Amino acid sequence: MMKLKVKYILPLITVLFIACNNNQKMEGTMQQTEPVFPKGEKITNDNFTGTAWLNYLVKTDSVHNVNIGSVTFEPGARTNWHYHKGGQILLVTEGTGLYQEKGKPVEIIKKGDVVKCPPNVEHWHGATPTESMTHIAIGTNTNIGGAVWLEAVTDEQYTK
Ligand code: MN
């Protein structure tokens, strides 16, 4: 009786092991697939430090009053300090990054996080020093006004 059990249990364990192993391989492949939105064009204006990319997805109009872009920050890259007259919502789609409102501690933001930037509150967002981060930035209430750009985030502020 015992002999029979071992005979059947061992192949079962082998099958389960192979199944789990295949599953891990599948997940590995999934991580290497292309992002939903390509990273777009390299940002060349002075409102950013480091290398960042913009894929402009939706231009505002009088019906929707939103600007939507996917922004990818390479490690170390971040926006200048700025605020949005109509506010902004960030949807983090890849990686790990940083977000800070003036006078508050730096927050770590990661894939799946949603950040609401209230109107007229100074802040910055970007990658961590070692990891890249992509977020979809939604400029809300664009009929009220867009981003107002301020000074760069210094290395000292960034690494705090
Ligand atoms: Mn912002």
Image: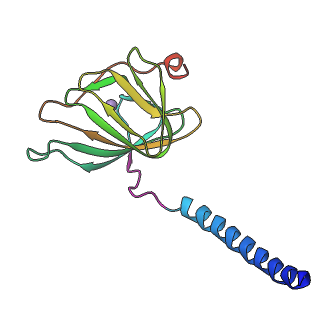
Looking at the figure, which quarter contains the N terminus?
bottom right
137 on left or right of 119: right
In the rendered image, is residue 79 in sight?
A: no
In this image, 20 relative to 4: left or right?
left
Residue 46: name its quadrant. top left
Residue 66 image position (x, y, % from top left): 19, 42
Looking at the image, which residue is at 24% across and 22% down? 120
**Residue 33: percent from left, percent from top:** 51, 62
Main SS, magenta residues: loop
| Closer to us: 158 or 98 | 98
Taking the view exactly as shown, the residue that stands out farthest to the front is 1
Whether residue 6 can be seen here: yes
Q: Residue at x 60, y 68 (%)?
A: 26
Quadrant placement of the C terminus: top right
For the record, the magenta segment spans: 34-41
Q: Residue at x 41, y 31 (%)?
A: 125
- Residue 26 or residue 81, whichever sits in front: 26
Asked whether 14 falls inside the magenta stretch, the response is no
